[in-house]
Image (cartoon, grey):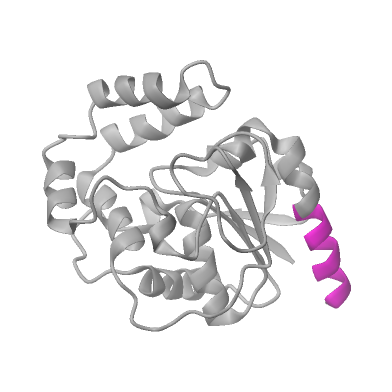
Amino acid sequence: MRLIFIPGFGEDESVFEKLHPHLPGEKVFLDNWSLLPDREMRGLNVLQYSADLVRQFNITEEDVVIGHSMGGWIAWHIKHLVYCPIVQIASWTDPGKVVAPTRNLPLIFWATKKKVVLNHLVKKLTVWKYYKGKPSMEVYRHVFENMVQGNKDNVNNQFRLIFNPVREKVQESPDLRIHARADTIVRFPDESTFEVPGDHFCLYTYPEKVVPPIVALLKKVKKRH
């Protein structure tokens, strides 16, 4: 049984560094920055990307996929394809739960290219408004800096994974949802959810709360296999 970790928008595998040492099993870390192209992919959506990941990493029902934020959204679509167990951390199955100032994709793509939002001034303002004095402040700074420095076509492709529609209906439920009530990036799910303290980066700031329900799920999965 492999544990496949998928980070969220703008993130890298370091978002899991406080979590994964406490979880048993072989571990594979996917990197959206290297797996998504640094060129525009206008028709790209999350189901297409998930299918690419399934093929490239030979993901099967024997694996467990653990996704944070956008990574959990991807994990949900992987489950739809191969029926593997998944864990969503600070993620969603209802796109309406994603907090966004606009869903106008042309405007988002333009603002990304022109660095209207992804710049150091906005980083300072959002850190001050949402994360000042919180244990998640440094991880948020790191993620935002990834987006400031990263290829903007790649960033827009990550936006496409979140916002581009998928025609095929996904009906499977995540095996485990973990969420903090104070998350300001993804609203708390309506479905049954394991609630933890912290905010969007609860897996980094409160790993001792996030680990136990995942370990319990892994034990159940191991028994089934």
Residue 29 image point, x, y percent: 56, 52
What quarter of the picture does the C terminus occupy? bottom right
Query: Looking at the picture, does residue 154 appear above or below residue 134?
Result: below
- Residue placed at 55% from the left, 49% from the top? 90
Q: Nearer the viewer, residue 99 or 79?
A: 99
Do we see residue 38 in this rendering? Answer: yes
Asked where in the image residue 27 lies, by quadrant, the reply is bottom right
List x then y, in percent, for residue 20: 69, 44
- Please give the name of the residue rendered at 85% of the width and 62% of the height, measured from the top-left corner: 219
Highlighted magenta segment, given as a residue range: 214-224
Residue at the front extreme of this rendering: 190
Locate residue 188, reporting x and y percent: 54, 51
Residue 73 is covered by the magenta coloring: no
Q: In this rendering, would 194 be left or right of 36?
A: right
Observer-nearest of 88 and 81: 88
Tell me, yes or no, if residue 24 can be seen here.
no
**Which residue appears farthest toward the top when viewing the image?**
133
Q: Is residue 173 above or below residue 96?
A: below
Q: Main secondary structure of the magenta part?
A: helix
The x and y percentages for residue 56 are 47, 70
Instruction: Return the residue found at the far right.
Output: 223
Instruction: Please state which of residues 49 and 199 is positioned toward the viewer in this rendering.
Output: 199
Was residue 222 drawn as part of the magenta stretch in this picture? yes
